[in-house]
Amino acid sequence: MDTSDIRDLAPGTAVHGKGKKRVRDILKVATEILAYEGYSKFTMRHIADRAGITLRNVQYYFKTKDILFQSVIEQRLKHDIESATKVIENHNLSAEDRFLAFVDNSLEENTTPFIRGLQFELWAQANHDAFAAKCRDHMTTVYSKFIYELIKPLTLGQSEKTRREKAVILLSMLQGFPLVEGSDIHIEFAIGNLRKLFRTEALIFVTSGAEP
C-alpha cells in the first residue's frame, strides 16, 4: 500500500549514523510517555530526562513540542500502515480473507494498552488543541485511504461514493471498538465473542450493495 501521504518524521534533523539513532531513541521515549503517562507529561524536559540526554539535545532534533508530537503521530501512522500492509500482502488469500486478516490485525493492535493510550490521548487533546486536531485529521485521512484501497475488490459493484463512505465508517468502527470491548455492554447484551461478531458484521457491511 502507498504511504506517500505520510510526512517525513523529523524534518530538518540529522539523517546519518548517531543522529538517526538519537531521533529513534527520542521518539521511542516520547511515544511511551504519551501512551502511558498522558499528554500532560509530554514535555520536552521530561522527555529529555527519560531519554538521559539534555533538553538542548532534544531541541536540536525537534525544535518545538508540536514538531515532536507530530513526529510521534507520523511514526505510529507509518508503523501501522506498514504492519497492516504486511498482513494483507499474501495474494494467495482471497480478497475476503485479506480483509478479515486486516480486521483481525487492527482489533489486536487497537486493544493493546499502548495503542489504546495513544489513541485516547490524541483524540482527547484534539478536542481542545488545533494542532492536535490537525494531526488527528491527517491520521484519519491516511487510514481512510488505506481502507478504501483495501475494500476495492470487495465493492466492485458499488459506487465510488459508497466505497469512500464505507471506508470512513469502517475506520470509525475499528477505532471505537476498544471503548466497547473495554466496557460491560457486551455482557449486558449477552454478546459472546465480540471480536468474532465484529469481523463478521464488518464483512457484511462492506460487501453489502446498500448505501451506508
Image (spheres, rainbow, N blue to C red):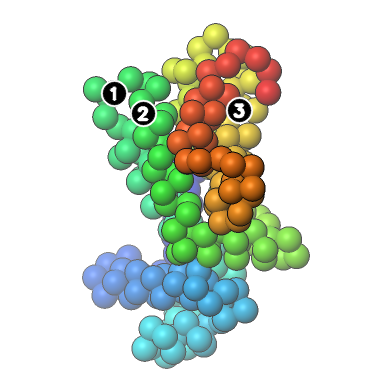
Q: Nearer the viewer, residue 180 or 184?
A: 184
Q: Which mark is residue 93?
A: 1
- Mark 1 and mark 2 in contact? Answer it, CB < 8 Å: yes
Say which amino acid is labelled 3.
Lys
- Is disc 1 placed on a helix, strand or loop? loop
Vertical side of 50 occupied by 93: above or below: above
Mark 3 to mark 2 CA distance (whole Å)? 17 Å
**Quarter of the image with the C terminus in it:** top right
Q: Residues within 10 Å of mark 2 (few under 14, many from 20)?
A: many
Q: Which mark is residue 98?
A: 2
First in residue order: circle 1 vs circle 3:
1
Say which amino acid is labelled 1.
Leu
- Is disc 2 placed on a helix, strand or loop? helix
**Quarter of the image with the N terminus in it:** top left
First in residue order: circle 3 vs circle 2:
2
Q: Nearer the viewer, residue 100 or 149?
A: 100
* Residue 196, x across and y down, in percent: 45, 36
Occupied quadrant, residue 133: bottom right
Q: Residues within 10 Å of mark 3 (few under 14, many from 20)?
A: many
First in residue order: circle 1 vs circle 2:
1
Vertical side of 49 occupied by 208: above or below: above
Mark 1 to mark 3 CA distance (whole Å)? 22 Å
Vertical side of 128 occupied by 57: above or below: below
Mark 1 to mark 2 CA distance (whole Å)? 6 Å
Residue at image coords 48%, 52%: 110
Q: Residue beneath label 3, please?
A: 166
**Residue 110 appears anywhere in the view:** yes
* Residue 119, x across and y down, in percent: 56, 58
Using residue 69 as the reference point, say whether residue 90 is left or right of it.
left
Residue at image coords 56%, 40%: 191
Residue at image coords 35%, 46%: 83
